[in-house]
Image (cartoon, grey):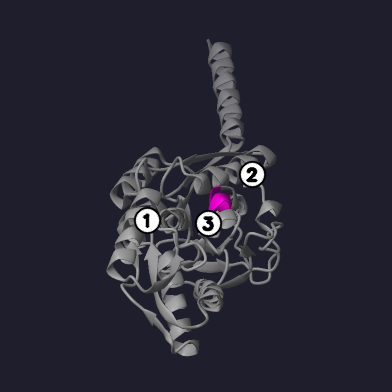
Amino acid sequence: MFKKSACAVLVLSSLGFAGALFAQGKPQNIVTVVKITGISWFNRMEVGVKEFGASTPGVTTQQIGPAQSDAAQQQRLVEDLVAKKVDAIAVVSMDPPTLEPVLKRAMERGIKVVTHEADNQKNTMADIEAFDNTAYGARLNDRLAACMGESGKWTSLVGSLGSQSQVQWADGGAGNATKKYPKMTLVDAKNESANDAEKAYSKAKEMLRKHPDLKGFQGSSSLDVLGIGRAVEEAGLQGKICVYGTGLPSEAAKFLESGAVGGIAFWDPKDAGIVMNKVAKLLLDGKQPTDGMDMGVTGYNKVQVKKGPGVGVIVTGQAWVEVDKQNYKKYAF
């Protein structure tokens, strides 16, 4: 009887030890939550998310997002991940304040939280910014001003007033124009497009009707320039209306070629996806991003790290790219 009990204890102990080893070897799951699924920008980001997972031992990665550009839908997705107790969440915040309570709960449960395009997010351990957002908006405005001859009416679009980075770009452009171009007049600033090319198109047509003497548009969402460019083409105003904004070369190509869009700027969403997941992995391993760190990704080779508005840090790269009709073909996305 004693021998059987001893054997049973030995077997159970062995199973417990094996279970512990199995638990230790369980892959860390990092889930990236984007603003909206199915658009080229976030399809490109998913390439980076998957690439990081495939090249990093002990990690599984996944990207999800709402079917519509809706902060409440994104919040529900994050709530579900917290309930499932994933290891890390990397989120491109649609509306940072909306996510504060659920991200706070995530961190309280030991889930690592990384954000992107949300330098006002308080409940994050690290927010990733591709560049200084105000400087980016100012640079777009400089290009717009050069096209406009530094005078005339112009307007701006954003995906939503809750999208922190896009509002910063629009405000950066407005501040730049006020400081440097006194003959430029901003009208009806920050029109919302809901990250929808069709809505950007409708808003652009509305602005052209309301301001027949309008000379320029500065877009923020990657889909803004597509809607604006379409409206400009339909009105036969190529070469008369200046359009600059964030976009992807593959999508904006036809408008760059026609002259309906003068130029775009962007950062590679693939690279941002990789960096978000790299930082999440650092946090999972008990490490922190540090000032001057090389993330091993173009544009993030010497990141700046500073204290954020809450418990985490802001990690900033130098990753923006400018293209126009002359050089957009260099970028195959």
Q: How far apart are marks 1 and 2 (CA)?
A: 33 Å
> For the residue marked with disc 2, what is the amino acid?
Phe
| Left or right of 26 in this view: 197 | left
Q: Where is residue 316 in the image (x, y as percent from the top left)?
A: 58, 68
Which residue is situated farthest in the front direction here? 236
Of badges 1 and 2, nearer the viewer stands 1
* Picture disc at residue 52: 2
User: In the rendering, which numbered label is found on residue 3?
Assistant: none
Q: Which amino acid does label 3 sit on?
A: Gly
The kind of residue tagged 1 is: Ala
Identified at 38% across, 63% down, the residue is 158
Mark 2 lies on a secondary structure that is helix
Q: Can residue 268 be seen in this view?
A: yes
Label 3: which secondary element: loop
For marks 2 and 3, give the one nearer the viewer: 3
Q: In this view, does 198 lie above or below 316?
A: above
- Quarter assignment of residue 288: bottom right
Residue 66 shown left or right of residue 274 in the figure? left
What residue sits 52% from the left and 73% below the top?
A: 144
Left or right: where does residue 186 sit relative to residue 144?
left
Q: How crowded is mark 2: few (under 14 residues within 10 Å), some or many (20 or more)?
A: many
- Crowding at mark 3 (Cα within 10 Å: few <14, some 14-19, many 20+): many
Mark 3 or 1, closer to the camera: 1
In the rendered image, which residue does mark 3 sit on? 247
Q: Mark 1 points at which residue?
A: 200
Above or below, 312 against 268 in this view is below
Q: What stretch is highlighted in magenta?
A: 251-255
Q: Is residue 286 magenta?
A: no
